[in-house]
Amino acid sequence: MLIQRSAGDFFKHRVQIQNVSVRRLEYFKKLIDGKSVLHYGCADWPIFTESRNLHLNLCKFSDQVDGLDTDSTTIEKMRESGLFREGSLYDTPPDKTYDFLLIPETIEHVNNVEGFITSLKHNCHEGTQIMITAPNAFVQSQLDEMKIQGDTYLETVHPDHNYWFSIYTLPNVVEKVCNTLNWDITFDEIGFLEKCSMVYCLFRFAND
């Protein structure tokens, strides 16, 4: 059991973690090796740059990585760039399943978290692993940036973000959504990436 909810204190929860300060790209490469992958949020809207694009770096490592992003304009530009495999970029979920769904720093952008998590099953087959990452709400470097200035509060955050997540709340919301639908899930890992600036959970739907 990776999450232990305290019986003695309603507000305290102990989370068993697997990784601390692992580099994101290197860890993703290890997880997707030899697998078919659907990468959500591949366009990096609105700051797509060739040198820093995660999807392009993943494609250099594997020819089994497809990309999905609702930003159809950028997806079309990516198709026209010639940098990506033909037929591998989508602006709506494709009608096929994958061994691995990679969802890095995307869930905090969606308007309906429950609907988003529910929709993931469309691209899963038995044994598909799902990796969701998000910025860590409580990393110290982030907290140091936030402060009261007179009658205003300065918060450093991407303007498109709708939520903050922590090492507890990210897997907790996944578990809650699945429990509501009577879906069994198995958490394989919960942990930190990039000097604890990101949190992640790795899980599978157990009743496919």
Image (cartoon, helix red, strand yellow):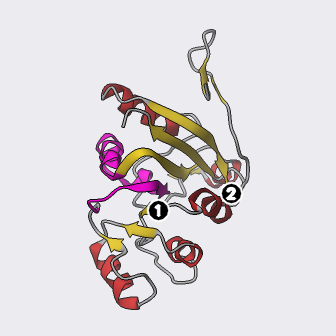
> Badge 1 is on which residue?
36
Task: Name the side, left or right, on which 156 lies relative to 65.
Answer: right
Is 101 part of what is drawn in magenta? Answer: yes
Amino acid on which disc 1 is placed: Ser
Q: Is residue 151 visible?
A: no
Q: Give percent across and percent down for residue 113.
A: 35, 44
The alpha-carbon separation of the residues under discs 2 and 1 comes to 25 Å
Magenta highlight range? 94-123
Residue 6 against residue 166 in the figure, above or below? above
> Badge 2 is on which residue?
194
Q: Describe the element under mark 2 as helix, strand or loop.
A: loop
Task: Name the side, left or right, on which 9 lies relative to 99.
Answer: right
Q: Nearer the viewer, mark 2 or mark 1?
A: 1
Q: Give percent across and percent down for residue 104.
A: 50, 57
Label tally: 2
Task: Name the side, left or right, on which 58 lies relative to 182.
Answer: right
Task: Please identify the quadrant where the N terminus is shown.
Answer: top right
Amino acid on which disc 2 is placed: Glu
Quadrant hosting residue 8: top right
Q: Which mark sits nearer the N-terminus, 2 or 1?
A: 1
Q: Badge 1, how many Cα within 10 Å: few under 14, some, many 20+?
A: some
Residue at x 59% of width, y 74% of height: 61
